[in-house]
Amino acid sequence: MSDARIPGYDFDNTALPASPVSLEELDKLKASVLFTDADEEALRQAWDVLEDQVEAVLDVWYGFVGSHEHLVAYFSTPEGEPIAAYLDAVRPRFGKWIEDTCTRAYDAQWLAYQQEIAVRHTTDKKNRTDQVDSVPYISMRYLVAFIYPITATMRSFLAAGGHSDEQVEAMHQAWFKAVTLQVALWTRPYVTEQW
């Protein structure tokens, strides 16, 4: 998936501020979710399976969000009218996030972009990337709650690659750990420094 045509996608922007989370803290988070080198390998294998299915995955996820008024509200005007252009703009970045989750090194640049994703859910930056007039933030509880559907729905896509049940399970567990790790990072701007 080419990132040259994705407005607002700037993973490789070296001008992004460094993450307030250090690499040492990231290692501790990885240990906390049991994320290992084997999981990184499983994610790379997962990308081989998912690369041609990204649009189908996004169809499932968008269908889920669209079927819940309280979720689609985050892509709507403050009066509750869905903003189609906003949903359309986010979609390719969401697809690129799938690829990044599977293929990027979890290093300082990755951490910086996780911080950028995080603040784009908060009053600090929500709506600015796409210049829309939507609600000012996404409630943290839905970031956490979304771990389950983003993980559960991935299994059937991972199973479509013809791998053994053991390999599919390894890819699925690696995906689950990676999503949990990222959401842990995305919740940071919602809490005060002492917490």
Image (cartoon, grey):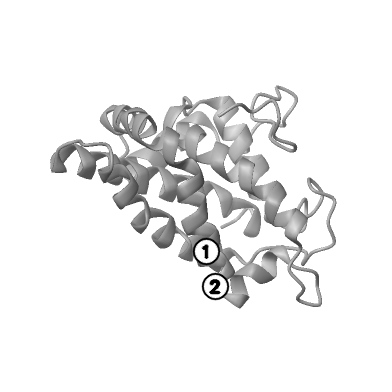
Under tag 1, what secondary structure?
helix
Nearer-the-camera pick, 177 or 32: 177
| Residue underneath mark 1 | 63
User: Up-down: is 148 above or below 160?
Assistant: below
Q: Which residue shows up at 75% across the image and 37% down it?
A: 7
Q: In the image, what residue type sits under mark 1?
A: Gly
Sort mark 2 into few (<14), some (14-19) or many (20+) by Cα contacts within 10 Å: few
Q: Position of residue 162 (x, y in %)?
A: 21, 37
Q: Which corner quadrant holds the C terminus?
A: bottom right
Numbered label tally: 2
Q: Can residue 49 be spotted in the picture? A: yes
Q: Are marks 2 and 1 in contact (CB under 8 Å)?
A: yes
Q: Which residue shows up at 65% across the image and 53% down it?
A: 189
**Which numbered marker is on residue 183?**
none
Nearer-the-camera pick, 155 or 184: 155
Q: In the image, what residue type sits under mark 2?
A: Ser
**Which numbered marker is on residue 67?**
2
> Toward which corner of the image does residue 171 lie, by quadrant?
top left
Position of 95 compared to 135: left or right?
left
Q: Position of residue 111 (x, y in %)?
A: 56, 34
> Toward which corner of the image does residue 52 lie, by quadrant?
top left
User: Up-down: is 141 above or below 160?
Assistant: below
Q: Position of residue 79 (x, y in %)?
A: 81, 77
Q: Which corner quadrant holds the N terminus?
A: top right
Sort mark 1 into few (<14), some (14-19) or many (20+) by Cα contacts within 10 Å: few
User: Up-down: is 16 above or below 159?
Assistant: above
Q: Position of residue 156 (x, y in %)?
A: 30, 51
Position of 37 compared to 164: left or right?
right
Under tag 2, what secondary structure?
loop
Position of 131 compared to 92: left or right?
right
- Distance Cα–Cα, label 2 vs label 1: 6 Å
